[in-house]
Amino acid sequence: MKKILLATCFALFLAGCANTRPSDDSAYQAAVSAVTQNEKVIFNNRGVWYPNQSKIVIRPVFAMPPMLDGNLTITDKAVYFMEWDDNSKEYNIVYKQSLQDIQRVKTEKFGLGIRLFIQSKTTWDGFSGPDIDKAYQHLKSVTHGTANE
C-alpha cells in the first residue's frame, strides 16, 4: 500500500511539472494559429485526451486509463488535440479528426465533471477540460449525430 501511495504522489508531482501551453497569451495564440493556419477557431482551451474510450469507467488509481494533458482546439474543419513541446516552442498534433468524419458525439457526467466523447469511423475518444460543454454544443450542431446517454 505504501508503494502505491508513493508512486501516486510521485506521478502527481511529475504531472504538475508539465507545461501544456506557452506562458504568454500572445505566444499561445500564435502557437495555435501555426497549427490551425487558415481555419477558423471555434473552441480553444486546455484539456485532457482519453484515447480509445467511449465512456467514463471508475478504476482504482493504479489502473487509471491512459490520458494526455494538452490543448483541445476545434476549428471549422477539424478537432485537434495538441501537446506543447517546450523545447521547440510549438504544438505537436497528437489527435486530428475531420468534422466530416465524426460519426457521433456525446457527453457523460460524473460528479461535477463532464466528458466529451467523439466517435470517428474507427474509434471513440474522450476529452475533458474547462468549458467542454461548449465544445460539445458546437460539435453537435455540425456533425452527423449525437448519442447522449
Image (spheres, rainbow, N blue to C red):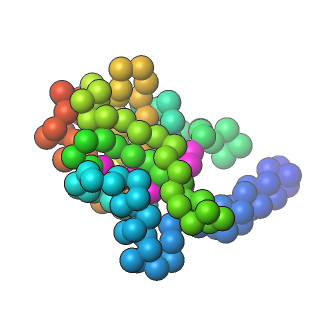
Q: Residue at x 51, y 71 (%)?
A: 22
Q: Position of residue 96 (x, y in %)?
A: 41, 39
Q: Position of residue 143 (x, y in %)?
A: 19, 33
| Residue lying farthest to the right in this orientation | 3
| Residue lying farthest to the left in this orientation | 141
Asked if residue 72 lies in the magenta stretch, the reply is: yes
* Main SS, magenta residues: strand
Q: Quadrant of residue 2?
A: bottom right
Q: Residue at x 35, y 28 (%)?
A: 119
Residue 79 vertical placement versus 118 (above, below): below
Does any portion of residue 105 appear in the rendered image? no
Asked if residue 106 lies in the magenta stretch, the reply is: no
Q: Position of residue 72 (x, y in %)?
A: 40, 53
Q: Decide which of 70, 115 is in the foreground and name it.
A: 70
Q: Quadrant of residue 112?
A: bottom left
Q: Position of residue 122 (x, y in %)?
A: 42, 20
| Residue lying farthest to the top in this orientation | 122
Numbered label tally: 0
Q: Decide which of 45, 146 is in the foreground and name it.
A: 45
Q: Which residues are magenta?
A: 67-74
Q: Residue at x 30, y 49 (%)?
A: 74
Does residue 64 appear to the left or right of 137 in the view shown? right
Q: Residue at x 72, y 57 (%)?
A: 11
Does any portion of residue 85 appear in the rendered image? yes
- Look at the image and tell me in which quarter the C terminus lies: top left
Residue 9 vertical placement versus 119 (above, below): below
